[in-house]
Image: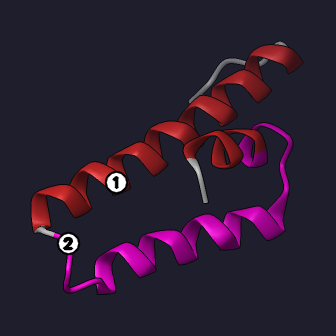
Amino acid sequence: MTPQKIRIAFEHKKPDRYQQAYEAVREIMSSTAVTRSRKLQKIAMIIDAAESGMKRRNDRSGRCAP
C-alpha cells in the first residue's frame, strides 16, 4: 500500500484501508531481505501518511488535530 493510498484512507475514514496499512507494516517487519534501518524508514513513511490524512480530515471538519 502506497503512502498516498494510506493518507487518503485516513483522510476519508476507510476502516478496511486501516487494516491494509496494518498489514503493510506487518509485512515490512516480517521481511528478512530488508535491513532494519530500511524497515524503519518504510514504517515511518506509513505513519507520516496516516497522520497527514488524519490532519487533513480534521482540518476540513474544523477540528483541531490531537
Q: Nearer the viewer, residue 44 or 31?
A: 31
Viewport quadrant of the C terminus: top right
Question: What secondary structure is found at the residue carrying circle 2?
Answer: loop
Q: Which residue shows up at 69% across the image and 63% down it?
A: 18
User: At x 31% / y 86%, what residue is drawn?
Assistant: 30
Asked if 62 appears above or below 56 in the picture, the reply is above
Q: Is residue 49 left or right of residue 20?
A: left
Verify whether residue 29 appears in magenta: yes
Image quarter of residue 53: top right
Which residue is tagged 2?
A: 34
Tag 1 or tag 2, which sits nearer the N-term? 2
- Give yes or no for contact between labels 2 and 1 (Cβ–Cβ under 8 Å): yes
Q: Is residue 32 above or below residue 38?
A: below
Residue closest to the eye, 64 or 1: 1
Q: Is residue 3 left or right of residue 46?
A: right
Give the number of the disc on residue 42: 1
Picture mark count:
2
Q: Looking at the image, is 20 positioned above or below residue 8?
A: below
Quarter in which the N terminus is drawn:
bottom right
Name the residue at 24% across, 63% down: 39
Indicate left or right for 30 with 64 as reference: left
Image location of residue 48, percent across then percent down = 45, 37
Q: Amino acid at mark 1?
A: Lys
The amino acid type found where label 2 is placed reads Val
Q: CA distance from mark 2 to mark 1?
A: 10 Å
In the image, residue 47 above or below residue 61: below
Give the dominant element type of the magenta stretch: helix, strand or loop: helix
Question: Could you tell whether 61 is left or right of 10 in the image?
Answer: right
Badge 2: how crowded within 10 Å, few (<14), some, or many (20+)? few
Name the secondary structure under disc 1.
helix
Q: Which residues are magenta?
A: 9-34
